[in-house]
Image (spheres, rainbow, N blue to C red):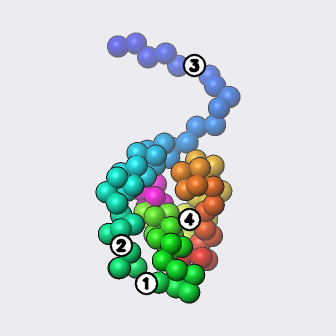
Amino acid sequence: MLIKIARTEKELSANAGLVIFKQLIDSIGLDQLLTNCIPTLKKGPAKNLKKFRHLLLAFETGADCLDDLEKLSCDDAFQAVCGGKVYSPKAY
């Protein structure tokens, strides 16, 4: 097996597996399973479910503390998988 290494100007991310993990979360209908389990704030359950999904994706990348969540909030790949808006660690 031959491996060819080529230079690229593209930014690479170790978070590429997040797309597959997000599709898995979507395919099992996690939102429907958790609707009655997650506490509801004044703004409704949708925001809490979104935060929970982001936390799951963060755990998938290896984040295990607020500092890691802060770093992920600046990661372009993580933002793209989360739909562009990522909560700050304080919001979690």
CA gap between label 4 and label 2 equals: 22 Å
Say the numbered circle drawn on residue 34. Answer: 2
Percent across and percent down for residue 35 are 38, 75
User: Residue, x 43% and y 63% (percent of image)?
Assistant: 56
Circle 2 residues within 10 Å: few <14, some 14–19, many ≥20: some
CA gap between label 3 and label 1 equals: 49 Å
User: Between disc 1 and disc 2, whose residue precedes?
Assistant: 2
- Magenta range is 57-61
Location of mark 4 (residue): 69
Q: Are marks 3 and 4 in contact (CB under 8 Å)?
A: no
Mark 1 or mark 4, which is nearer to you? 1
Q: Are marks 1 and 2 in contact (CB under 8 Å)?
A: no
User: Residue, x 40% and y 79% (percent of image)?
Assistant: 38
Location of mark 1 (residue): 39
CA gap between label 1 and label 4 equals: 22 Å
Amino acid at the residue labelled 1 = Pro
User: Residue, x 63% and y 55% (percent of image)?
Assistant: 84
